Image (cartoon, rainbow, N blue to C red):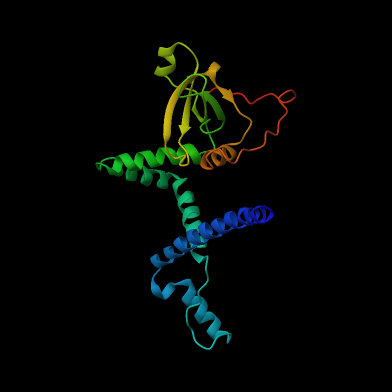
Amino acid sequence: MHLRRYLVAGLLVWIPLGLTILLISFAVRQMDKTLGIIPARYQPELLLGQLLHQLGFVAAPDPINIPGLGVILVFMILLITGVLAANFMGRAFLGGWERLMERIPVVRSIYSAAKNFAEIVFSDSGHAFKNVLLVEYPRKGIYSLAFQTSTQLGEVQGRTGEEVVGCFVPTTPNPTSGFIIIVPRKDVTVLDMEVDEALKLIISLGVVVPPWRNDPSKVPAPSIDAGD
């Protein structure tokens, strides 16, 4: 029994560490491939090798392999793209690009869905994915985790005659797919857990349960803010 317990304890240490290293290494290797867009004569690894040769640190001006240069390149591309997209000319160019993408069958559906999802997840404004909710789904008496997506639902709210909340109920272990449900505000429970904690709970099939840090008798639960 002790041997099994020690083996399991060892696995619990090494499996997460190993998977983390593998995923980070994979991401770095994929980003390093972006260096291929730079002309051969301007490759940073070659330029570094030539510089070290001129300084007398190496015998031949061969390329110096430095893992992670692609990460820096990707970061710079994202930063420059963001700066350009934030000014008038960049917004005009992006507007034309999006109109072009929307004219291409099949591509427009994928591009539009990806763009909307990115705006929801990465935008600092609005109320999307701000709260983790507990809703009775798929039937009363059974609870599911959900993410708040919107509180201003226009026609849906008008036709139901009550305040409703847009909720995204993710599937497990893949939280990028799921269901959109509309729930009356009074039937929604806002949880204390953060979005990343809820994602860990979903991805782990309910095994990784975040601790409940707040004392419900002292700390009021968060509330759903009204939309802008």
Number of callouts: 0
Image coords of residue 223 (percent x, y): 61, 23
Quarter residue 35 falls in? bottom left
Tell me: residue 98, above or below residue 2: above
Residue in the picture at 44% in, 16% down: 157
Q: Nearer the viewer, residue 49 or 176?
A: 176
Residue occupying the far front of the picture: 1
Residue in the picture at 46% in, 64% down: 32
Tell me: residue 93, above or below residue 40: above
Q: Nearer the viewer, residue 58 or 145?
A: 145
Residue occupying the far bottom of the picture: 59
- Residue 111 appears in the rendering: yes
Image coords of residue 203 (percent x, y): 51, 42
Residue in the picture at 53% in, 80% down: 51
Quarter residue 131 falls in? top right
Residue in the picture at 46% in, 21% down: 139
- Residue 225 appears in the rendering: no
Tell me: residue 132, above or below residue 155: below
Image coords of residue 163 (percent x, y): 50, 16
Q: Nearer the viewer, residue 93 or 45?
A: 45
Image coords of residue 48 (percent x, y): 52, 76
Residue occupying the far top of the picture: 161
